[in-house]
Amino acid sequence: MSGFSLPKLLAGLHDTIEHRLKLARETMGHPVNKGDASEAVWLDLLQTYLPRRYKAAKAHVVDSTGAFSEQIDVVVFDRQYSPLVFQHEGQTIIPAESVYAVFEAKQSIAAPEITYAHRKVASVRRLHRTSLPIPHAGGTYPPKPLSRILAGLLTLESAWNPPLGQTLIDNLCAGDDDSRLDLGCVAAHGVFACDQAGVYWIRPQGKAATAFLFELIARLQETATVSMIDIRAYARWLTAAPEQPST
């Protein structure tokens, strides 16, 4: 007998995340510091437990037309096949083709936070993504159809009573297809998700962070690999005239 217990291991993972989120809320005085600490907890969870082909970072997303998203708290992106991930003055910038999922991290879920998350994720989904034919030993495969970028909201608590009820669903349904939140975690209460038909389900449970992680991994497995980026589409900007500083 090993002495290990799988239920205890799974519960312990969630308990660690919930404890760290509560500690960030209780010990950080400034709202910005609280937000940064909460983001760090979720990023650490994904950086530790996602397969190595995935990376997670706070980042902006850029496309080959030169358009940028708003800054996103948590971007899950490919690093195995993606040649471009920029670091500029402490900021991370990721090409749109490399993105698997985007999440906003907040202390609590309520209508303003959902509206805010809708806007942020739409700024990513509306970016242009290229997809090239894939060469192989016998020729080429056609370009891979673009997979939907997953999006969601990660919080510690809910502002509603009940925490995960019809009010939550009504607010989630307020977004359009570009802004729809597919998956989320309210660590103290449970998880929510949207199926392929656009129908939301809610699962109250005591191991919400672990359940969210498993559901995210399952959905990433269904997505498979990101499309083959057209690197020459980005290279065209090498000949573009640089912007002149304003005087």
Image (cartoon, rainbow, N blue to C red):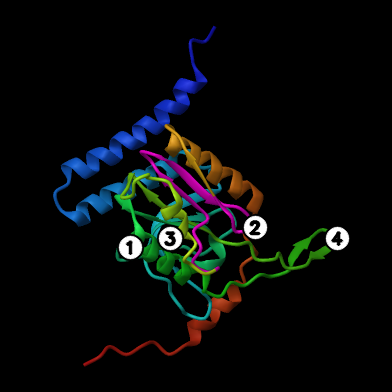
Image check: 84 left or right of 247? right
Check the image and report above or below for 219 versus 49. Answer: below
Give the CA separation, mark 2 to mark 1. 25 Å
Mark 3 is surrounded, within 10 Å at the Cα level, by few (under 14), some (14 to 19) or many (20 or more) other residues, namely some
Mark 1 is surrounded, within 10 Å at the Cα level, by few (under 14), some (14 to 19) or many (20 or more) other residues, namely few
Q: Secondary structure at mark 1?
A: helix
Give the CA separation, mark 4 to mark 1. 53 Å
Q: Which mark is residue 112?
A: 1
Q: Secondary structure at mark 3?
A: helix
* Residue ID at (55%, 68%): 177
**Nearer the observer, disc 4 or disc 2?**
2
Q: Which residue is mark 3?
A: 171
The answer to whether mark 3 and mark 4 are in CB contact below 8 A is no
Residue type marked 3: Asn
Image quarter where the C terminus lies is bottom left
Residue 201: percent from the left, percent from the top? 54, 48
Residue 205: percent from the left, percent from the top? 45, 34
Q: Earlier in the sequence, mark 3 or mark 4?
A: 4
For the residue pair 182 and 163, the one nearer the viewer reads as 163
Res. 224 visible in picture: no
The answer to whether mark 1 and mark 3 are in CB contact below 8 A is no
Residue 31: percent from the left, percent from the top? 19, 55
* Residue ID at (30%, 62%): 90
For the residue pair 167 and 123, the one nearer the viewer reads as 167
Residue type marked 2: Ala
Q: Earlier in the sequence, mark 4 or mark 2?
A: 4
For the residue pair 204 and 87, the one nearer the viewer reads as 204
* Residue ID at (49%, 86%): 239
Residue type marked 4: Gly
Q: Which residue is mark 4?
A: 138
